[in-house]
Image (cartoon, helix red, strand yellow):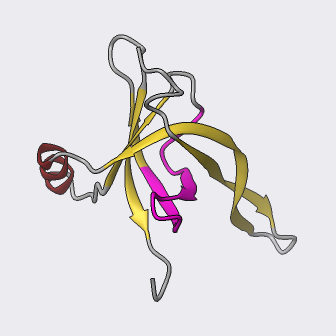
Amino acid sequence: MISPGRHLNRRLQVWRPVTADDGAGGQDTSLALQGTVRAKVDQPSNADRMLAAQAGSRHDHTVFLMPGADVRRGDELRGTDQLGQDQRLRVLSVVAPSTPVYRRAACELVQREGA
């Protein structure tokens, strides 16, 4: 079993898209903070990258989470990397192994303009 203190060494904020009426017959979409999760952020294996490329997706990072973490496709995970730089990761998919020991999220690094 994954030990949160040992392996899940980062705290990431979970931001989720929400929509609201704009008052003019349309809707605005924005990101709302849902909470914070413990995580471990890794670079994906070459096999993971190849599978993502075959599916027409970018898989920059793999994020490991506790089994009950409320992280969904489309969420954005925000935190700081090992160098203290702001980091944003867009969740492309979330899967759990057959034995619920952890959840694994395939993510794409979102870089701000000029970064």
Residue toward you, 9 or 44: 9
Quarter occupied by residue 93: top left
Q: What residue lies at 69% left-to-right and 64% top-to-bottom?
A: 30
The image shows residue 5, relative to residue 44, as above or below, that is: above
Quadrant in which the C terminus appears: bottom left
Is 43 situated left or right of 22 in this image? Answer: left
In terms of depth relative to the viewer, which is nearer, 35 or 32?
35
Q: Position of residue 114 (x, y in %)?
A: 46, 89
Name the spot of residue 38 as percent of width and height, x first.
Answer: 56, 36
Magenta-drawn stretch contains 26: no
Residue 74 location (% of width, % of height):
51, 51
Q: Residue at x 51, y 62 (%)?
A: 88
The residue positioned farthest toward the right in the image shown = 23
The picture places residue 44, in percent across and down from the top left corner, at 24, 48
Q: Tell me where the magenta segment starts and ends, as one range.
A: 70-91
Q: How many marks?
A: 0
Give the residue drawn at x 48%, y 45%. 73
Image quarter where the N terminus lies is top left
Q: Residue furthest bottom?
A: 114
* Residue 87 appears left or right of 104: right
90 inside magenta stretch: yes
